[in-house]
Image (tube, rainbow, N blue to C red):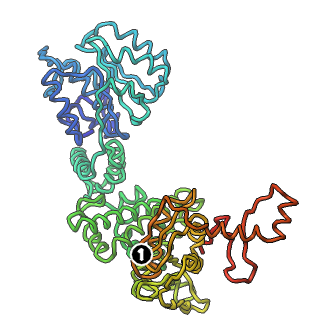
């Protein structure tokens, strides 16, 4: 949709006492009036110029982008005849009102039928349409059937329409409009030319609103126009409806411009400056300041969910600036007014911090939308964002461990409700030995826990104890090392599936029992390298039998016990499900045969 300057859209019975809303008054009346759909207009212009005009089109897009308006303009172009009877055939160039234009624009032409599929969904309605297809037009060149919200038709109705849609008479054209293109059967889509009408970008929409406000004898501050365009989400009809309401705010003020803050109050939006202040307070870890800024916005009438959406919008803009440079600031959804703040935030934060803020705010928005108390949910989301500012990201935590550091994450300190130090990020690492005997290079797991002493003191930090890299004299030493490293699943796999062929320092040859994981040799090679800090060679001899597996030897030892033999004599169908070491004995462990793991 865009500006329609001509009188076609106005009702012939309009008087000084009847008012036409802006969305109807400024409905486009020709392809030249359309904004934001240049690709579609270019395609149709070429089709009409070369007389390669399709018999059916489907127009899709969100509400208010001009689907029905485009359908009516297309019907006019198909049937355009000059006011003096000049007839050069179908054309998209309609400089003046033609013989059929007004009747088509006002939906009262006998040869242009508009049908609302939302209220006429049945097969009988389509049968009536098909019955009328065979008759020639009464006045115009083509009979045009415009079906709005076509996705609402029933399956039977679609099936009844298919044959006529594929091979209609030469004097019939179909134009479909829908907001749910995925609900249309592919059999219908394959018979139509499809045009996707995109949302109108905010800059174009704001300029369009400015021109209409000027025509109406009013004025709106640029910041207010940007708010309206943003609130309309690409829909021209929504934007014109909001503008209509905004112009009434100063209808009796002698033409004074509508202020941006008045539009903000009307829409229940948050002050943009306060949104940036709220974001910076939260990301700096200052929860009290962030909550105070939110309270100011809430008291001014801003909806909690709107505040969350605005925070997401500015985080998105700052992240774009961080990724693409300062030039991306003016291209964002917020516009040029927010560019300096976006650059300031982007330069002061890492990409990890920004993307983490996005994730937390997305969760906060979802909670705000479903919570019984939206304001409370928004405050919890803000507090969560503020306290997350003290926590390191996973890669930061790993770098800290690699340097042997155990400290709180960098960032502004937070305070708890008692005035003491707030929660700090404490890193706890379970480390295997590095090639140099240190604890950091072979980190096996990392957990991050928020801990604080009741008195407000930092929690004590655990220390890692280095030990010398092990040397393995036998394969059993490797299994014991897996147990010591608490890699129980790997230990079970070694005991159950490995048949040892030969073993020496730096080299091991094995055969695999049936059912062995295919990645087991590679895992063994990597673990030997990690544990010893030396290169190992692991070879798999498919033809060799190798020794018994540790599991088989253990079961054989158990089966040789007289008590076990007697048990099998009494219960011949019994099976050994697991072998346990004696409690408190060496190598106390979970049963090797069960494959259970303890992942700490």
Most extreme residue toward the right is 570
> Label 1 belongs to which residue?
536
Q: Position of residue 201 (x, y in %)?
A: 27, 49
- Quadrant location of residue 486? bottom right
Give the SS element for disc 1.
loop
The one nearer the camera, 23 or 542, is 542
The one of 350 and 312 positioned closer to us in this rendering: 350
Residue 326 pos. (x, y %):
22, 68
Identify which residue is drawn at 39% across, 24% down. Answer: 187
Q: How many marks?
A: 1
Asked if residue 364 can be seen in this view, the reply is no
Residue name at image x 30 percent, y 58 percent: 333
Against 255, residue 81 (above or below) is above
Q: Is residue 265 visible?
A: yes
Q: In which quadrant is the N terminus drawn?
A: top left
Q: Is residue 568 left or right of residue 496?
A: right
Q: Is residue 406 placed above or below 107 in the rendered structure?
A: below
Instruction: Give the residue furthest to the top.
Output: 135
> Is 356 or 215 nearer to us in this picture?
356
Using a 10 Å C-alpha cutoff, classify the residue at mark 1 as few (fewer than 14 neighbours), some (14 to 19) or many (20 or more).
some
Q: Quadrant of the C terminus?
A: bottom right
| Closer to the camera in the image, 105 or 555 | 555
Classify residue 465 as left or right of residue 269: right
Judge whether 125 appears above or below 570 on screen. Answer: above
Question: Residue 464 in the image: x percent, y percent?
Answer: 51, 89
Q: Position of residue 332 (x, y in %)?
A: 28, 59
């Amino acid at each position: 949709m865009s500006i329609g300057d001509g009188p076609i859209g106005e009702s012939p019975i309009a008087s000084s006492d009847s008012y036409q809303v802006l969305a109807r008054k400024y409905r486009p009346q020709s392809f030249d009036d359309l904004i934001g759909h240049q690709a579609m207009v270019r395609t149709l212009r070429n089709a009409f110029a070369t007389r390669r005009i399709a018999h059916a089109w489907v127009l899709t897009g969100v509400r208010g982008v001009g689907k029905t308006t485009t359908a009516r303009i297309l019907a006019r172009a198909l049937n355009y005849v000059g006011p003096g009877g000049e007839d050069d055939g179908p054309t998209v160039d309609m400089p003046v009102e033609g013989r059929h234009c007004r009747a088509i624009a006002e939906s009262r032409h006998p040869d242009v039928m508009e049908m609302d599929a939302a209220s006429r969904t049945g097969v009988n309605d389509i049968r009536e349409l098909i019955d009328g297809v065979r008759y020639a037009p009464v006045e115009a060149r083509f009979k045009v059937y415009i079906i709005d919200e076509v996705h609402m038709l029933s399956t039977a109705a679609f099936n009844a329409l298919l044959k006529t849609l594929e091979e209609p008479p030469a004097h019939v054209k179909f134009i479909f409009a829908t907001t749910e293109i995925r609900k249309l059967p592919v059999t219908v889509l394959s018979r139509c030319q499809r045009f996707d009408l995109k949302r109108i970008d905010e800059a174009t929409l704001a300029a369009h609103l400015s021109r209409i406000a000027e025509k109406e004898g009013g004025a709106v501050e640029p910041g207010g126009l940007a708010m309206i365009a943003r609130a309309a989400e690409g829909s021209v009809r929504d934007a014109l409806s909001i503008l209509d309401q905004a112009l009434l705010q100063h209808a009796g003020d002698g033409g004074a411009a509508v202020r941006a803050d008045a539009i903000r109050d009307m829409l229940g939006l948050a002050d943009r400056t306060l949104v940036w202040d709220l974001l910076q307070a939260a990301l700096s870890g200052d929860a009290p300041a962030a909550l105070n800024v939110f309270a100011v916005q809430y008291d001014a009438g801003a909806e909690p969910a709107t505040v969350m959406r605005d925070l997401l919008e500015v985080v998105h803009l700052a992240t774009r600036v961080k990724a693409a440079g300062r030039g991306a600031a003016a291209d964002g959804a917020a516009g040029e007014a927010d560019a300096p703040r976006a650059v300031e935030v982007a330069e002061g934060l890492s990409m990890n911090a920004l993307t983490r803020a996005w994730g937390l705010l997305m969760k906060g928005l979802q909670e705000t939308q479903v919570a019984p108390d939206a304001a409370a949910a928004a405050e919890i989301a803000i507090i969560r964002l503020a306290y997350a500012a003290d926590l390191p990201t996973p890669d930061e935590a790993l770098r800290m461990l690699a340097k042997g550091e155990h400290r709180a994450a960098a960032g502004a300190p937070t305070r708890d409700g008692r005035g003491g130090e707030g929660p700090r990020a404490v890193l706890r690492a379970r480390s295997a030995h590095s090639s140099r005997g240190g604890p950091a290079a072979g980190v096996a797991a990392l957990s991050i826990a928020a801990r604080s002493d009741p008195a407000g003191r930092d929690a004590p930090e655990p220390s890692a104890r280095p030990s010398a890299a092990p040397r393995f004299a036998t394969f059993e030493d490797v299994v014991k090392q897996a147990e010591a490293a608490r890699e129980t699943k790997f230990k079970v796999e070694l005991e159950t599936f490995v048949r040892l062929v030969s073993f020496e320092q730096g080299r091991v040859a094995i055969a695999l029992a049936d059912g062995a994981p295919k990645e087991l040799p590679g895992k063994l090679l990597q673990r030997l390298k990690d544990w010893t800090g030396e290169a190992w060679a692991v070879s798999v001899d498919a033809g060799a039998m190798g020794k018994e597996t540790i599991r088989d030897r253990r079961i054989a030892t158990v089966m040789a016990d007289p008590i076990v033999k007697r048990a099998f004599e009494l219960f011949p169908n019994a099976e050994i499900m697991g072998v346990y070491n004696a409690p408190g004995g060496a190598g106390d462990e979970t049963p090797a045969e069960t494959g259970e793991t303890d992942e700490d």
